[in-house]
Amino acid sequence: MATQAQDSARAVCEAWHGELSIRVGHGILECSVLTATKADGVLALQERTGAGATLFAGDDVTDEDAIAVLGPLDIGIWVGPGESTARFCLPDAEAVSFMLESLATQRGNARP
């Protein structure tokens, strides 16, 4: 049933004759009038916030765009099975939660 829904959604998107950007992820079909990617979002957030470092965790094909633009001081984490260009990998969302909690605790202890 999910495959049928995705096929129907793709047919609607393709009816726009190339005016929509179509990307497939895990159980999701993204159709957008914009060609912006998660990489564009990460770069915009880095610029706007002046972040010295960025942590990005993702588990889908579309997350690879963001991982690819991370710099040497940034941390890219692939979550779950599969191949990625991320330097780090965690098995699941629970592990990400534990890592973020540990990181927050360490950062809190490092502040005066």
Image (cartoon, rainbow, N blue to C red):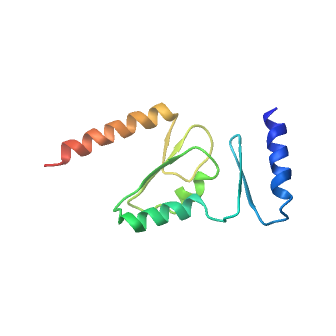
Q: From the viewer's perspective, is residue 87 above or below residue 98?
A: below
Please tell me which residue is depicted at 62% across the width and 64% down the height of the picture: 36
Q: Position of residue 101 (x, y in %)?
A: 34, 36
Q: Residue furthest left?
A: 112
Q: Position of residue 61 (x, y in %)?
A: 64, 50
Task: Report whether 85 appears left or right of 9.
Answer: left
Please tell me which residue is depicted at 33% across the width and 62% down the height of the picture: 52
Task: Report whether 10 appears left or right of 107.
Answer: right
Q: From the viewer's perspective, is residue 89 above or below residue 31?
A: above
Task: Report whether 5 appears left or right of 90.
Answer: right
Q: Position of residue 21 (x, y in %)?
A: 73, 61
Q: From the viewer's perspective, is residue 103 above or below residue 1?
A: below
Which quarter of the figure has residue 38?
Answer: bottom right
86 and 41: which is toward the camera: 41
46 and 34: which is toward the camera: 34
Please tell me which residue is depicted at 80% across the width and 47% down the height of the picture: 9
Question: Which of the image's four quarters has the N terminus?
Answer: top right
Please tell me which residue is depicted at 63% across the width and 53% down the height of the picture: 62
